[in-house]
Image (spheres, grey):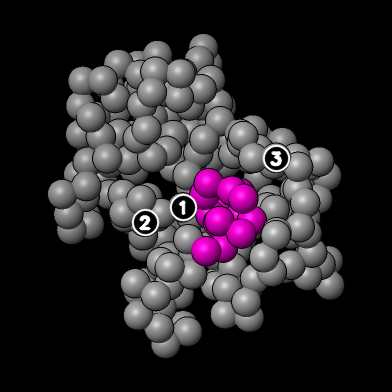
Amino acid sequence: MIRVLVVDDQTLVRQGIRSLLELADNVTVVAEADDGDAALEAVEAHHPDVVLLDLRMPGRDGIATMAALRDRGVEVPVLVLTTFDDDDLVLQAIRAGARGYLLKDVTLEQLVGAVRTLAAGQTLVQPAITDRLLRAARGLGTSAGKEGPMTAPVDPLTPRELEVLRLLASGYANREIATALHLAEGTVKNHVSNVLLKLGVRDRTRAVMRALHLGLLGDPDR
């Protein structure tokens, strides 16, 4: 059972998300919180597998909440669920450590799929905002984490690794990539690990951002 904490300052939104998620198999909402401080307490009390987090809340907002979780050494995956399609907010969320990014107009299937993806230790970026993330990445001189400057990888990516990278950029999970490329899931995991290693990043989102900066994904304006 995947245990979810829902954090949103609007009661109706929280209740709606709870009702939707509990229609899915193997997903349960263990707690709700209406601001960042309450979210931190709920994480400590309930140990959720995934935190579903709004970004703009009174008091401690979503970005500050993720920063506090990181400072406390809490590694629970955070799925940002927001109405704001804002480049700056999304990039701030990346720097704060969010593992997933969805807008609130997603379907139940997409939401549940994202929760399951993060619970499995993977990263997901909604295709609708992927291009915006990639465009913004072009203006970054360095990546969002502790990686160094965005220089070209020491070892070039193989054609297969580039295929995997392009599917990562579209928000595909490992199993979906395996199906699309007719590969074993374990083989895909190896390719993803190689991509991260060659690009010098720690997660899939930063890999996509760095790849665009290096021109490995083509120009999203085309």
Could you tell which of marks 2 and 3 lies nearer the N-terminus?
2
Q: Which residues are magenta?
A: 194-207
**Badge 3 local density, few (<14 within 10 Å), some, or many (20+)?**
few
Which residue does the image show at 31% across and 49% down from the upper left? 119
The picture quadrant where one finds residue 128 is bottom right
Q: Amino acid at mark 2?
A: Thr
Residue type highlighted by circle 3: Gly
Residue 88 visible in the displayed image: yes
Q: x and y percent of residue 165 in the render? A: 59, 68
Whether residues under marks 2 and 3 lie with C-beta atoms below 8 angstroms apart, the answer is: no
Circle 1 crowding by C-alpha within 10 Å: few under 14, some 14–19, many from 20: many
- Which residue in the structure is indicated by mark 3? 148
- Give above or below for 110 relative to 11: below
Which SS class for mark 3? loop
| Residue bearing mark 1 | 123
Frontmost residue, 94 versus 144: 144
For the image, the number of numbered tags is: 3
- Left or right: residue 191 versus residue 131 is left
Q: Nearer the viewer, mark 2 or mark 3?
A: 3
